[in-house]
Image (cartoon, rainbow, N blue to C red):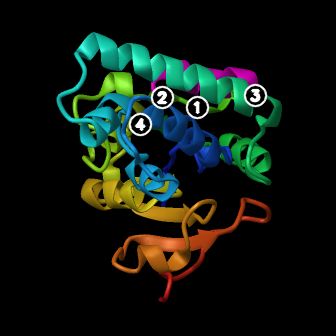
C-alpha cells in the first residue's frame, strides 16, 4: 500500500462529538460576555482552547485563567458526552485491520491530553496507537503542520508516507501544510467546504467498509 502510517484527528474524526464541544463553548463564552452565536462558535472551534479564548475575547484573561476556563469547558463536555462515547461506525474494524496489517497509527489532535485520555481509555483503544500528539505537545497548533510532523517523527515515517483522517477544513489545511494526503469524514462539514484542497483522496460518511480509492477524489 502507498501509505505506511495513518494519522487520526480525534474530535469529529474518531468520535462524533463536535456538537458537544461547540455547545459547551457556546455556554461558557456567553457566560463570559462574548455575545457569540452558535454558528460563530462552530467556526472558532479549532486550535488550542487558550487560542480560541484569545480570538473571541482578546486580552481578557491571564494564562492561568485561560487554563482554568479550558478545564471547566472540558469537564462540561465530558459530563454531557460520556453516555454517548463510542467510535464512529466501522472505525473499530479499521483500527484492528490496520494494526494487524502492520500499518503504524497515531492520534494528532488539538485536544489536551486530558480529553484524549478520556477517549482512548474510555474506549480501550490505546493499544492501537504508536504515538499520540496533543495540544500539550506542540508550540503551534493546527493548521500549523507541527502536530502531524511530530506524529510522523514519532512513528519514524516520512510525511509523504502518511495518510491523515480529518473532519474539518482547518485539519485538512494542516495535512496540506505537512505534505500529506487526507481522508475527510463528513461528520460536521459538507464536501463543498473542502473544494480548495487537492490533497483529499476520498470523502466518507463513516468507516464502514472503508477502502482507499485508486485515484484522487474529483470535485
CA distance separating discs 1 and 3: 22 Å
CA distance separating discs 4 and 1: 17 Å
The answer, for residue 124, to whether it is visible in the render is no
Quadrant in which residue 137 is drawn: top left
Residue 30 shown left or right of residue 202 in the figure: left
Q: Does residue 113 show up magenta in the picture? A: yes
- Lower sequence index among marks 4 and 3: 3
Q: Secondary structure at mark 1?
A: loop
CA distance separating discs 4 and 3: 19 Å
Q: Secondary structure at mark 3?
A: helix
Quadrant into which the N terminus falls? bottom right
Residue at numbered disc 3 = 82
Q: Is residue 209 above or below residue 90?
A: below
- Residue under the image location 51 percent in, 53 percent down: 38
Q: Which dot marks residue 129?
A: 1
Q: Secondary structure at mark 2?
A: strand
The stretch in magenta equals: 110-124
The front one of 12 and 34 is: 34
Q: Nearer the viewer, mark 4 or mark 2?
A: 4
Residue at numbered disc 4 = 110
The front one of 88 and 44 is: 44
Q: Nearer the viewer, mark 4 or mark 1?
A: 4
- Lower sequence index among marks 1 and 3: 3
Residue at numbered disc 2 = 132
Amino acid at each position: 500500500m502507498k501509505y505506511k502510517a495513518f494519522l487520526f484527528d480525534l474530535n469529529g474524526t474518531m468520535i462524533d462529538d463536535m456538537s458537544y464541544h461547540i455547545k459547551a463553548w457556546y455556554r461558557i463564552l456567553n457566560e463570559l460576555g462574548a455575545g457569540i452565536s452558535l454558528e460563530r462558535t462552530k467556526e472558532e472551534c479549532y486550535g488550542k482552547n487558550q487560542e480560541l479564548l484569545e480570538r473571541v475575547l482578546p486580552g481578557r484573561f491571564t494564562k492561568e485563567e485561560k487554563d482554568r476556563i479550558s478545564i471547566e469547558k472540558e469537564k462540561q463536555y465530558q459530563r454531557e458526552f460520556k453516555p454517548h462515547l463510542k467510535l464512529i461506525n466501522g472505525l473499530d474494524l479499521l483500527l484492528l485491520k490496520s494494526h494487524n496489517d502492520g500499518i503504524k497509527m497515531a492520534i494528532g489532535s488539538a485536544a489536551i491530553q486530558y480529553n484524549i485520555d478520556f477517549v482512548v481509555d474510555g474506549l480501550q483503544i490505546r493499544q492501537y496507537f504508536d504515538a499520540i500528539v496533543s495540544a500539550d505537545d506542540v508550540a503551534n497548533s493546527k493548521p500549523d503542520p507541527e502536530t502531524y510532523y511530530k506524529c510522523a517523527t514519532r512513528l519514524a515515517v516520512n510525511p509523504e508516507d502518511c495518510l491523515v483522517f480529518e473532519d474539518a477544513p482547518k485539519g485538512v489545511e494542516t495535512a496540506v501544510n505537512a505534505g500529506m494526503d487526507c481522508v475527510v469524514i463528513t461528520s460536521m462539514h459538507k464536501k463543498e467546504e473542502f473544494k480548495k484542497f487537492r490533497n483529499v483522496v476520498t470523502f466518507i460518511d463513516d468507516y464502514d467498509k472503508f477502502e482507499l480509492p485508486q485515484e484522487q477524489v474529483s470535485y
